[in-house]
Image: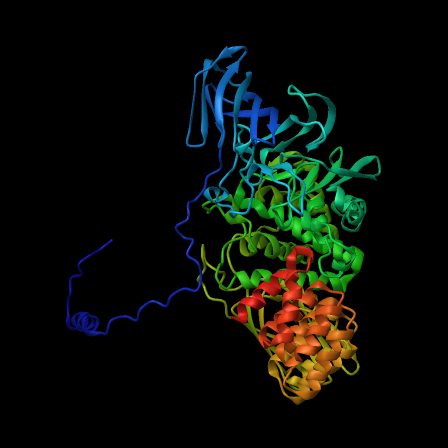
């Protein structure tokens, strides 16, 4: 509202003149964050009918890249309706029938609208029979918010050196509409049936159980009939056809199969053999037995990770690798993530795209759980640290709530906020509630909402009902608002106690919403003296906070967030001697944090401590952080780096040592590392460093690398980049 003030009296006049004569206000500071405030605010999609079942029959011709299809859509009216609208893209709709009668329809702007012959009353059912098809099928994924390389919908793959000719679908996030008319939204769950006719020497994989295989309508073809009798959303429907070999396994009585290219049979076991152990682990961890009739994993080209589909996960072909690549590219985290989706995403599915943390955050958190189960707390902690760092990198340009109702396309919700940040917040929530209460809450949530769409309110209610835990404050602060704490921490010892000052320095600005002025979380501080250590619980709260912990001896070091659960930027001010003591005997997460701090501080004493860590620390991530803090121009550091680059048993450390040395290592050393290291990543690092040097010997090695086969083409890509750098 704009008002013209009435000026009365000298003081008011002076104030007005002061404003009129003041200099222009400073220009606003440009925000570092992407502005998403104008993105659309979404409301839940609500159809006046419920789809009960899809029966999709497709005749697929790989030579013409064409499909001819019929889909029977079994639906039930939820109110009186005279028309039905379905999502339908890419193909031509040729006719629609119900009860044998042809129906009028329009097909425009991605929507198929069918006029019913007679209105359908609430509770009444109907089967629509839709004929459709097309040739030269090729979806431009960028029109739908996906990368150009993502083969949304139905795709016909040509044979290459890496893969045979095949056909596959990618229904996530809105790809089902590109291969059958549907209500293509996660809130609508239905049973599903597929009859796929393909060339007779191919196999077909889909959801549920294989009912049978019969002669196809065209010579040289067969029809594969699959059926899923439990409801799921359309984005989890799948079809893959090709010359696959199937490796059989079991989880109890549940068939578990690995579908791979014939050339990959020998290596497939390396990537997939832990699947059944993961299923058994998650049975116990989630408190709900694996809920489906079988589990298949199948590899395809064109994607780097995985796309869960109910009972049948699609994985990028790089999931399978040779023995050498296991040290650099193990697939077990990916496999665990996709297995976990059969509870988080398939058994329960988010009600709308802004609730994706209930699937992807839990899938990512499950990777951490598997690391802890199989490899122990140090490996699990490092896995979670990398997830937090991934989020914090994105947070330099994007700050958004994890749970949101603002997006342009569904894929806007699938980023480092949903995956790693969400996973880290689940871990923090478990720390807050306690293990038993957390497991009771998630078990109740899964049991109560099996085969249903869910939202965050359902999750909050489940914890209140099963664990008597009110987690709303946590959800509202940490997931429904953007950002994270930025903490400035200082500590002193006054002879009797440790005095700690904590300042929350995060700003209010964000992409969407406002960052909390002060975050709250129960944490702990560990005070370590010559006599031992003592852990002091406290609650992080308030913009400025002063804490006092008893300490009769001067601490060797003080460890903030002793359980390593906080998602935050930590700026901890303490002297090098304290960091060196922490590097010597804290847990792995604390030692690594100390190594990073010492590397940033520099100095002779700090580098000496880092050299000791490189040669003596038991955990590879600490050695890696120490390597990254050394100075290759310093003779003693360079010697330790060269030794680590050759002798460290962990490829991550050898790779980091080569990167840190760079061209200073010399061509002969780098060529030797390229030719002799067992790690593809270390070889690629050596090639990159050779690109900095130039010269005939380096150029010859780079040419050799350019012709080398490696997983994800990592060595040849490094060579191509090195060639470009030298121009």
Q: Is residue 200 visible?
A: yes
Q: Is residue 551 visible?
A: no
Q: x and y percent of residue 52 in the render?
A: 60, 24
Please state which of residues 366 and 228 is positioned toward the viewer in this rendering. 228
Q: x and y percent of residue 28 in the render?
A: 34, 67
Q: x and y percent of residue 255 in the render?
A: 80, 35
Which residue shows up at 70% across the image and 26% down it?
224
Q: x and y percent of residue 509 in the render?
A: 44, 62
Write down the quadrant of residue 710 in the picture. bottom right
Write down the quadrant of residue 143 in the picture. top left
- Colouring scheme, one of rainbow, by chain, secondary structure, one colour: rainbow
Write down the quadrant of residue 208 in the picture. top right
Please state which of residues 350 and 637 is positioned toward the viewer in this rendering. 637
- The correct choice, above or below, for 94 with respect to 684 in the image is above
Which residue shows up at 55% across the image and 49% down it?
414
Number of marks in the image?
0
Q: Is residue 663 left or right of residue 619?
A: left
- The correct choice, above or below, for 100 with respect to 487 in the image is above
The residue lying furthest to the top in this view is 100
- The correct choice, above or below, for 151 with respect to 580 in the image is above
The residue lying furthest to the right in this view is 252
């Amino acid at each position: 509202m704009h008002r013209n003030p009435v000026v009365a009296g000298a003081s008011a006049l002076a104030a007005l003149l002061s404003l009129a004569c003041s200099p222009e206000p400073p220009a606003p500071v440009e925000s570092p964050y992407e502005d998403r405030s104008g993105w659309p605010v979404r409301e839940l999609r609500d159809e006046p009918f419920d789809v009960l079942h899809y029966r999709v029959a497709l005749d697929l011709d790989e030579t013409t890249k064409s499909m001819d299809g019929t889909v029977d859509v079994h639906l039930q009216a939820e109110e009186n309706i005279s028309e039905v609208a379905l999502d339908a893209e890419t193909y031509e709709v040729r006719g629609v029938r119900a009860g044998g009668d042809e129906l009028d329809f329009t097909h425009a702007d991605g929507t198929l609208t069918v006029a019913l012959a007679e209105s359908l009353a609430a509770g009444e059912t109907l089967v629509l029979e839709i004929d459709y098809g097309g040739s030269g099928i090729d979806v431009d994924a960028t029109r739908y918010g996906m990368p150009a390389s993502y083969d949304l919908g139905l795709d016909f793959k040509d044979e290459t050196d890496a893969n045979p000719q095949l056909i596959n679908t990618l229904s996530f996030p809105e790809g089902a509409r590109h291969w059958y008319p549907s209500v293509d939204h996660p809130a609508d769950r239905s049973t599903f049936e597929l009859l796929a006719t393909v060339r007779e020497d191919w196999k077909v994989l889909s959801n549920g159980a294989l009912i049978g295989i019969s002669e196809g309508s065209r010579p040289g073809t067969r029809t594969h009939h699959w059926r899923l009798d439990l409801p799921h959303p359309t984005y989890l429907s799948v079809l893959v056809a090709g010359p696959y070999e199937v490796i059989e396994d079991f989880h109890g009585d549940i068939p578990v199969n690995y579908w791979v290219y014939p050339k990959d049979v020998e290596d497939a076991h390396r990537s997939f053999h832990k699947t059944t152990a993961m299923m058994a682990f998650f049975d116990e961890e989630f408190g709900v037995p694996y809920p489906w009739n079988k589990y298949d994993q199948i590899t395809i080209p064109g994607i780097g990770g995985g796309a869960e589909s109910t009972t049948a996960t699609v994985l990028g072909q790089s999931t399978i690798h040779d023995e050498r690549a296991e040290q650099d590219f193990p697939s077990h985290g990916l496999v665990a993530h996709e297995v976990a989706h059969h509870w988080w995403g398939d058994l329960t599915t988010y009600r709308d795209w802004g609730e994706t943390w209930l699937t992807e955050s839990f899938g990512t958190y499950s990777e951490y759980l598997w690391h802890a189960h199989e490899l122990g707390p140090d490996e699990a902690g490092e896995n979670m640290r990398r997830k937090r760092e991934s989020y914090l990198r994105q947070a330099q340009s994007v700050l958004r709530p994890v749970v949101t109702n603002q997006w342009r396309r569904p894929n806007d919700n699938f980023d480092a906020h949903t995956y790693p940040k969400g996973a880290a917040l689940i871990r923090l929530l478990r720390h807050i509630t306690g293990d038993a209460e957390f497991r009771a809450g998630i078990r109740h949530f899964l049991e109560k909402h099996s085969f249903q769409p869910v939202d965050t309110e359902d999750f909050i209610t489940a914890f209140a009902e099963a664990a008597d835990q009110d987690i709303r404050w946590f959800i509202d602060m940490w997931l429904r608002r953007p950002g994270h704490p930025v903490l400035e921490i200082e500590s002193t010892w006054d002879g009797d106690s440790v005095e700690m000052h904590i300042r929350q320095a995060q700003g209010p600005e964000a992409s969407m919403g406002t960052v909390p002025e002060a975050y709250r979380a129960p944490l702990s501080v560990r005070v370590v003296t010559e006599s031992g250590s003592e852990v002091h619980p406290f609650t992080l709260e308030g913009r400025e906070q002063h804490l006092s912990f008893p300490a009769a001896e001067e601490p060797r070091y003080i460890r903030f967030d002793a359980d390593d659960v906080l998602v935050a930027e930590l700026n901890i001010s303490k002297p090098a001697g304290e960091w060196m003591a922490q590097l010597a005997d804290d847990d792995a997460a604390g030692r690594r944090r100390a190594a990073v701090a010492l590397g940033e501080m520099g100095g002779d004493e700090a580098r000496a401590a880092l050299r000791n860590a490189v040669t003596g620390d038991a955990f590879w991530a600490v050695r890696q952080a120490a390597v990254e803090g050394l100075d290759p121009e310093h003779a003693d550091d360079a010697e330790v780096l060269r030794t680590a680059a050759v002798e460290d048993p962990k490829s991550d450390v050898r790779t980091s040592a080569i990167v840190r040395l760079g061209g200073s290592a010399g061509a002969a050393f780098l060529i030797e590392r390229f030719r002799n290291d067992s790690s593809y990543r270390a070889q690629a690092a050596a090639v990159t460093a050779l690109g900095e040097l130039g010269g005939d010997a380096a150029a010859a090695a780079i040419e050799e690398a350019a012709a080398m086969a490696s997983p994800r083409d990592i060595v040849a890509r490094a060579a191509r980049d090195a060639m470009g750098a030298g121009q």
